[in-house]
Amino acid sequence: MSEIEITPEDIRAFFDRFVVAFASFDEWQVAELFATPAVACRKDGSLVALTTAEDVAAYYKAALDGYRSGGCTYCEWSDLQTMPMGAVSVAAAVNWRLRRADGSILVAWRQTYCLVKAPGGLKNFAAISHAV
């Protein structure tokens, strides 16, 4: 069996797709970036089981609605760090900045994603918000 390689371009493409999905404020576009079952770990250490695409969509609908009501119009990522986890998965940490239309920052944080190679690109199966 040949080794599957996840390239830096694959990882950047995942986060670029996340930015586009986020900017749509459509929870179903965000849900397409997830493999299920998945799990999210919040800053406080609480876990959220994301068993189905519907769970992912519901989780992100609440977040997207809150960000939009706070004035967020777009997001950006930076400071990518990665750690391979075998031939088909990688841990990737990025800084997120959610911005208002005037460019001011609504909120910023660091998050790590566990990504797996899937048809159509990488998918997230675990997300961990870093405590600050």
Image (cartoon, rainbow, N blue to C red):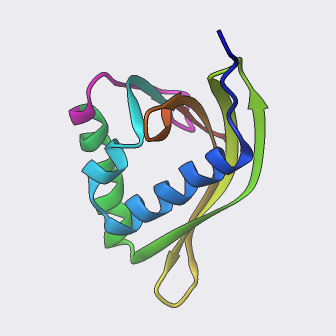
Is residue 36 left or right of 112 when viewed as pictured?
left
Q: Is residue 9 left or right of residue 55?
A: right
**Residue under the point 78% across and 44% down:** 81
- Count of picture labels: 0
Q: Is residue 116 left or right of residue 95?
A: left
Q: Nearer the viewer, residue 64 or 2?
A: 2
Residue 119 visible to the viewer: yes
Q: What residue do we see at 31% from left, 41% from top?
A: 59
In front here: 40 or 9? 9
Q: Seen from this angle, which residue lies furthest front?
A: 1
The quadrant holding residue 44 is: top right
Q: Residue at x 41, y 42 (%)?
A: 33
Q: Quadrant of residue 109?
A: bottom right
**Magenta run includes residue 110:** no
Residue 102: x, y in percent?
52, 91
Q: The N terminus lies in which quarter of the figure?
A: top right
On screen, 3 above or below 113? above
Which segment is the magenta one? 41-54
The correct choice, above or below, for 44 with respect to 71 in the image is above
Find residue 27 and report its horizontal and vertical position in percent: 28, 52
Q: Position of residue 115 (x, y in %)?
A: 57, 32
Does residue 80 sit above or below 22 in this rendering? above
Residue farthest to the bottom, as pictured: 102
Asked if residue 125 shows in the view, the reply is: no
Residue at 36%, 53% (x, y): give it: 63
Location of residue 127 in the rendering, given as x and y in whole percent from the top left corner: 54, 34
Of residues 103 and 121, which is closer to you in this image?
121
Q: Is residue 52 magenta?
A: yes
Question: Which residue lies most toward the top here?
Answer: 1
